[in-house]
Amino acid sequence: MLELLNNPISTCSQKVRLVLHEKGIDFTDTRIDFRAKEHLTPEYLAINPDGVVPSLLHDGQPILDSSVIMEYLDEVFPDVPLSPRDPVGRAKMRKWLRFIEEVPTVAIRIPSFNQVFVRHRADLSDADLEDDTNARTLRRTFYREMGRTGFSDARLQESYDRLRETVTRMDDALADRDWLCVDLTLADFCVVPTIDRMRDLGLSEAWSDKPHMKRWWEAMQARPAYRATYYPGTRVTDIYDEIGEPA
């Protein structure tokens, strides 16, 4: 009934897997191989024209965009609710979701590609580099800016600043509550992959002086859904022996 087309190390795929596991929903885990560019094949693009993962197929009907998928799952499978019951509470949760999507989710891509993924473009010819860039239906500008050597120091610093701002906001919000929106909600699961990737890239120093955020992070890692989502091969350090030191 449910098929998730996703990639193990994709942070957007991870947040959907977290919700599926937290809600105890059975699904078919179909893994899309980035190295083989399966997300850019005509077959996949017919499902998701953006050429990104994840995509959810519910009885064959495609549901697209990871945050949309999270909310869809919470509406269609309400037995384990992950949204506040009252409109004001839901509005506060959605404000967190928008912030997470627009700030840390975007920011974590810069160090991820600089430290890990750009290496696959280093030896491409100019023609192959252009072909690879043009194949990215949604993120051509991102790939063009990255080139074959990565993003500028200024862009990297901007991403670090935004990630630290995220951790600071979380710590402030968690000073008097266990979860971002009092109860455990989609907002908590939405930000987990960014925090996990930060740790994987050696950026956990950002919350070394954030006791409330550290408590939240320990609680998230203790959940069965977290352990089910992060199986072997889901982190960049599982795949790459050596990752560059962060600035």
Image (tube, helix red, strand yellow):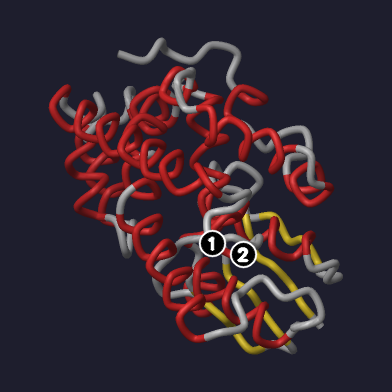
Quick one: label 2, few (<14), some, or many (20+) residues within 10 Å? Answer: some
Q: From the viewer's perspective, is residue 57 above or below residue 17?
A: below
Which residue carries the number 1 mark? Answer: 181
Answer with left or right where residue 169 lies relative to residue 31. left
Foreground mark, 1 or 2?
Answer: 1
**Which amino acid, by three-letter code, is at mark 2?**
Thr
Coordinates of residue 95 in the picture (x, y in percent): 38, 68
Q: Secondary structure at mark 2?
A: loop
User: How many numbered discs sit on the rendered protein?
Assistant: 2
Question: Front-most of 37 and 239?
Answer: 239
Mark sitting on residue 8: none
Answer with left or right where residue 156 lies relative to residue 96. left
- The residue under the point 58% across, 50% down is 177
- The residue under the point 31% across, 50% down is 103
Q: From the viewer's perspective, is residue 185 above or below residue 140?
A: below
Answer with left or right where residue 185 lies relative to residue 21. left
Quick one: label 1, few (<14), some, or many (20+) residues within 10 Å? Answer: many
Q: From the viewer's perspective, is residue 29 above or below residue 194?
A: below
